[in-house]
Amino acid sequence: MSKFVHAFTTQSKLLEDLSQQIAYDLKTAIRHYARATMLVSGGSTPKPLFEVLRRIDLPWEKVSIGLCDERWVPPTHNDSNEGFVKKHLLQERAGKARFVGMYTEGLSLKEAQEHCSQTYRKELYPFDVTLLGMGKDGHIASLFPESRQLDHALDLTNKKFCIAVEPETAPHSRMSLTRTAILSARHLYLHFEGKEKLAVYQEVIKGEDMHTLPVRSVLQQDLTDIKVYFR
């Protein structure tokens, strides 16, 4: 595994470089496989990136977009990642992309776990681009420190793509990608911004305990390359 670290002093340059690299990965996948898949995260950090990406000229009708995690609320809820991605990414040119969500109306979180894994394997796999964010507590997707489901989520012998999570430190039940799913990406990105998250990152790269800082599960591994973009 190689870790490629890209540090920026301005947000505009970070967004320009990261959006162009993601667009290149998607175009390459389309050229080779006639389709491309991108998995994205919610939250405030990727919003400006989405607003740049959605204006890039590429064959979006051949791109399928899914989520790294989802709060178990309907898409109309203010906290829905599906609603957020549709509002900020699936607009303008990117409005032609196909969206595949995690939330399933009428199913409980646990009932939906297997359904989500099967849907992702059938509709989205292989994942060409996976774009992760990082919380100030070191979580990625909805894999939170010391959560009861974390061991199973990080276990690479667990070949499921999705796992139901009941976080103790965040609102809402969640569906999340497993570590197996995350590390299967052809192109894996970690994007974060701000001094607080930079301090977390600097702590992360000094240690190995994935349970206290789950982001280590993608940074301290030798299975796949990861590109880190921050300012």
Image (cartoon, rainbow, N blue to C red):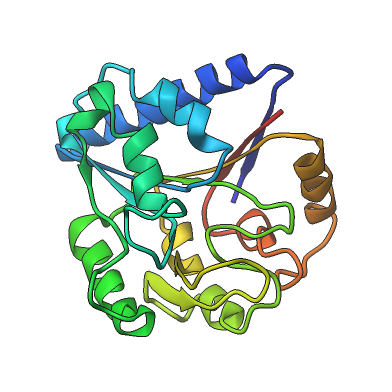
Where 216 sits versus 128, above or below? below
Give the image location of residue 17, x and y in percent.
53, 20
The image shows residue 151, relative to residue 14, as above or below, that is below
Q: How many dots with numbers?
A: 0
Residue 208 x %, y %: 77, 65
Quarter of the image for residue 191 reads top right
List x then y, in percent, for residue 122: 18, 63
The quadrant where residue 198 appears = top right
Q: Is residue 31 visible?
A: no
Q: Give the vertical position of 222 relative to 154 (above or below).
A: above
On the rendered structure, is 25 left or right of 179? left
User: Quadrant of the image for the C terminus?
Assistant: top right
Q: Residue at x 66, y 54 (%)?
A: 219
Image point (67%, 64%), residue name = 214
Instruction: Give coordinates of residue 21: x percent, y percent.
Output: 45, 26
What residue lies at 38% left-to-right and 64% top-to-bottom?
A: 73
Q: Is residue 109 left or right of residue 16?
A: left
Residue 88 shows in this picture: yes
Q: Residue furthest front?
A: 77
Pick the front one: 226 or 223: 226
Camera-nearest residue between 67 and 81: 81
Q: Is residue 169 left or right of residue 123?
A: right
Rendered position, 196 above or below 72? above
Residue at 63% over, 63% down: 217
User: Relative to 174, is 118 on the left or the right?
Assistant: left
> On the image, which quarter does residue 63 sit in?
top left
